[in-house]
Amino acid sequence: MLTLSFQQVYHRDIPLDQVRRMLRLSDEENWRIRDFQEVHEEAKNRGFGRVFRSPTLFEDMVKCILLCNCQWSRTLSMAKALCELQLELQLPLSNESLANAANKTIPGPLERKEVSSCTKIGNFPSPRELASLDEKFSAKRCNLGYRAGRIMNLAREIVDGRVQLRELEDICGTLSLPEYDKLAEKLKVIDGFGPFTCANVLMCMGFYHVIPIDSETIRHLEQPLLLKFEFGLLAGFLLDRSEVWQFYEEWFGKLSEMPPSSYKLITAANMRPKRNGKNKRIKLSMADIFNYRNKVKHDLCTLVVD
């Protein structure tokens, strides 16, 4: 029998815990998926149900910040740049460029060029890896813009213990409305966590009481049904996102088989169908919206507009 040391067991369990979190592998999640698919047989037939998430809550929180006020392609490029930066922080360097960055000294032009030359991707950086970096350096290196300050502040608050990730995740028990309200209050005090970001983070934690939506979501939802609608009229449509997912796959093919280099293509701007006289957008009345919503056998969700 192979005997493992405590350290070996610890390092073995970390990736297992991360996989469980990413795939939501638990008895509670299995029950929720079963209940959902019982009222949505088509989703069950397509294997639709679980919402994939990051290995850690910190990564989910940072990526939700990256979603704000930019196009999807830039969100992806910023996340990729952070992973490249994480690898650079692990590599031995012949100069002090990254060491200076960690000590809050902004590298000069030559150093910045060398820092940006990495073409490989590391892991997503941890709070401790980001906490000591200079805000201006990380904003320039990863094209984060104003988000750099919010991400660095979040990392420092986690390292300093002012934000307790374990405590936040432990609140997720029954996923009840009181638990949602408690978590929402804790998130709102974090710099950069407005209603849209909070709703996204809470969805990653398993709460769907508030559905985050932005203008890109509206363009996505216009495409499958060839509808034209305004803010405030979308809640009924959001209840059946599997239809939108199916539309994506009809347009791009199986998303699980799509190479990462093509992820940036999944935007509404790239999914504009050719229209003819028989295939025009229509503007629905409020009565039309409610009639369609009543056909979808789910509860009406709250809507948050970024």
Image: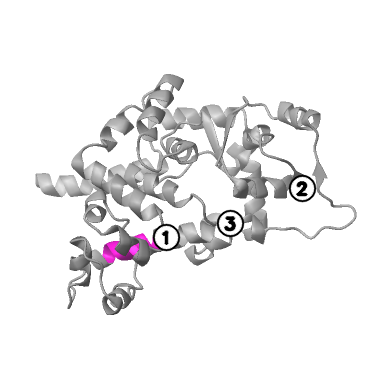
User: Which quadrant of the structure image shows residue 115?
Assistant: bottom left
Tell me the CA gap for discs 3 and 2. 22 Å
Is residue 7 toward the left or the right of residue 52 in the image?
A: left
Residue type pointed to by label 1: Met
Tell me the CA gap for discs 1 and 3. 25 Å
Of the two numbered discs 1 and 3 in the rendering, the one whose residue sits closer to the viewer? 1
Helix, strand or loop at mark 2? loop
Residue at mark 1: 78
Residue drawn at x 38%, y 48% is 62
Disc marking residue 254: 3
| Residue interval drawn in magenta | 80-87
Disc marking residue 226: 2
135 shown above or below 221: below
Is residue 94 toward the left or the right of residue 120 in the image?
A: left
Q: Earlier in the sequence, mark 3 or mark 2?
A: 2
Residue type pointed to by label 3: Lys
Q: Earlier in the sequence, mark 1 or mark 3?
A: 1
Q: Are marks 1 and 2 in contact (CB under 8 Å)?
A: no
Helix, strand or loop at mark 1? helix
245 shown above or below 43: below
Is residue 85 toward the left or the right of residue 206 in the image?
A: left
Query: Where does the image place residue 185, in percent across and percent down from the top left?
Result: 38, 28
Residue drawn at x 80%, y 32% is 288
Judging depth in this view, the residue of 210 and 191 nearest the camera is 191
Q: Provide the major secondary structure of the magenta segment.
A: helix
Residue type pointed to by label 2: Leu
Of the two numbered discs 1 and 2 in the rendering, the one whose residue sits closer to the viewer? 1
Q: Earlier in the sequence, mark 1 or mark 2?
A: 1
Tell me the CA gap for discs 1 and 2. 32 Å
Query: Where does the image place residue 34, in percent across and percent down from the top left?
Result: 52, 30
Q: How many marks?
A: 3
